[in-house]
Amino acid sequence: MSNLLERITVDPSICHGKACVRHMRWPVEVIIDLIASGMSFDDILNDHPELEKEDILASLSYAKISLSGKTLEEVN
């Protein structure tokens, strides 16, 4: 899982410091919203070719860690 989590970055100069995918302006919360809206991984990847399947999996892993009360630093 830690390899996937390397795809999640936090940079104060990108999206107000929210957890994002690979220093892009793709906050984890937006990826989770896309999944919650019913989009499949394939739908997301077809609509947003800059994303990779591993980015979606990393976002889900990050969300799980956040809900557990841990931080990204504690896991990496």
Image (spheres, helix red, strand yellow):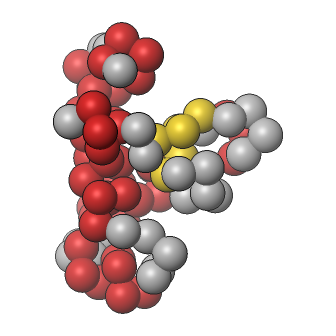
Report the residue that reaches farthest toward the front. 3
Percent of width and height locating residue 61: 25, 40
Percent of width and height locating residue 73: 43, 16
Determine whether 68 is above or below 58 in the image: above
- Identified at 24% across, 73% down, the residue is 41
Report the residue that reaches farthest toward the bottom. 46
Residue 27, visible in the rendered structure: no
Q: Tell me the quarter of the picture where residue 72 sits.
A: top left
Report the residue that reaches farthest toward the right. 13
Q: Nearer the viewer, residue 1 or 66?
A: 1
Q: Tell me the quarter of the picture where residue 71 sits.
A: top left
Determine whether 16 is above or below 45 in the image: above
Q: Nearer the viewer, residue 6 or 63?
A: 6
Percent of width and height locating residue 2: 27, 32
Horizontal side, residue 45 vs residue 1: left or right: right
Determine whether 10 is above or below 33 in the image: above
- Identified at 61% across, 57% down, the residue is 24
User: Split into 4 quadrants, where in the image is the C terminus?
Assistant: top left
- Identified at 28% across, 66% down, the residue is 53
User: Split into 4 quadrants, where in the image is the N terminus?
Assistant: top left
**How many labels, in total?**
0
Percent of width and height locating residue 7: 43, 46
Residue 39, visible in the rendered structure: yes
Horizontal side, residue 41 vs residue 7: left or right: left
Determine whether 33 is above or below 73 in the image: below
